[in-house]
Image (spheres, rainbow, N blue to C red):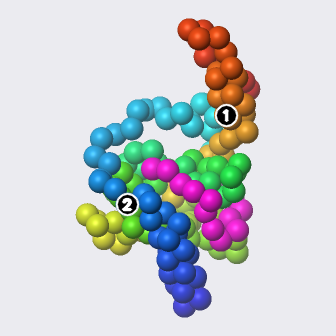
Amino acid sequence: MYLRARTCAIGATLLALLGGCAAAPQRSEPQTPSRYDAYAGPPIDQFTWLGHFFSWEALGRDRAVVFTTPSDAYLLKVWPTCDLRWVINTIAVTATGGTVSAHVDAIKIDSAPTGPMTCPIEEIRRIDYQRMRADLRAQKHAQPGAAPPPPQR
């Protein structure tokens, strides 16, 4: 019961925070690979979740980036039966003891076209967001017409 109340509270908070995201459905697939893919590490089993998101972004039907802080981001892949491309009224994540685990936890969404849906997490990859931002700053300061530098590893 506690988890359900917590999930509802999280969903309500996210609804308030993400209210600006309520626009027309995203019907087209985003470019693949996404800008995050070059910075995503290998799959990991779990990550620590402090009970709230800083932000999130759908990257297609079965992938999303979740920011747990302004600089900590994770690429989550869910089961292909889910569709994260639609406008989502609420989003929440299940967690056990402050840990989100692949193959155990799920993203819970509620969207107008699909209604409530539980999307089991198939894969988690940590994104090196600091390196991504550094590379973007370097590109911005590069001379016009120059090719962007490759991601640094």
User: The residue under label 2 is which amino acid type?
Assistant: Ala
- Of residue 74 and residue 88, the one placed in the foreground of this image is 88
Q: Is residue 73 visible?
A: yes
Q: Are dots 1 and 2 in contact, CB under 8 Å? A: no
- Tell me which residue sits at (72%, 31%) in the image: 134
- Earlier sequence position, callout 1 versus callout 2: 2
- Tell me which residue sits at (49%, 63%) in the image: 18
Q: Could you tell whether 142 is left or right of 80 in the image?
A: right
Classify 73 as above or below 146: below
Determine crowd level at label 1: few under 14, some 14-19, many 20+ residues with C-alpha closer than 10 A: some
| Residue 152 at x, y percent in the picture | 72, 24
| Residue 109 at x, y percent in the picture | 42, 67
Where does label 2 land, which residue? 22
User: What is the residue that sits farthest to the top in this orientation?
Assistant: 145
Classify 41 as above or below 86: above
- Of residue 31 and residue 25, the one placed in the foreground of this image is 25
Q: Could you tell whether 70 is left or right of 111 in the image?
A: right
- Label 1 vs label 2, nearer the camera: 2
Q: Is residue 150 magenta?
A: no
| Residue 135 at x, y percent in the picture | 68, 27
- Of residue 122 and residue 113, the one placed in the foreground of this image is 113
Q: Look at the image and give the residue range highlighted in magenta.
A: 45-58
- Tell me which residue sits at (30%, 53%) in the image: 25
- Tell me which residue sits at (54%, 60%) in the image: 103
> Which label was assigned to residue 55?
none
Name the quadrant of the N terminus. Answer: bottom right
Name the quadrant of the C terminus. Answer: top right
User: The residue under label 1 is which amino acid type?
Assistant: Met
Quarter of the figure with residue 119: bottom left
Determine crowd level at label 2: few under 14, some 14-19, many 20+ residues with C-alpha closer than 10 A: few
Quarter of the figure with residue 131: top right
Where does label 1 land, which residue? 132
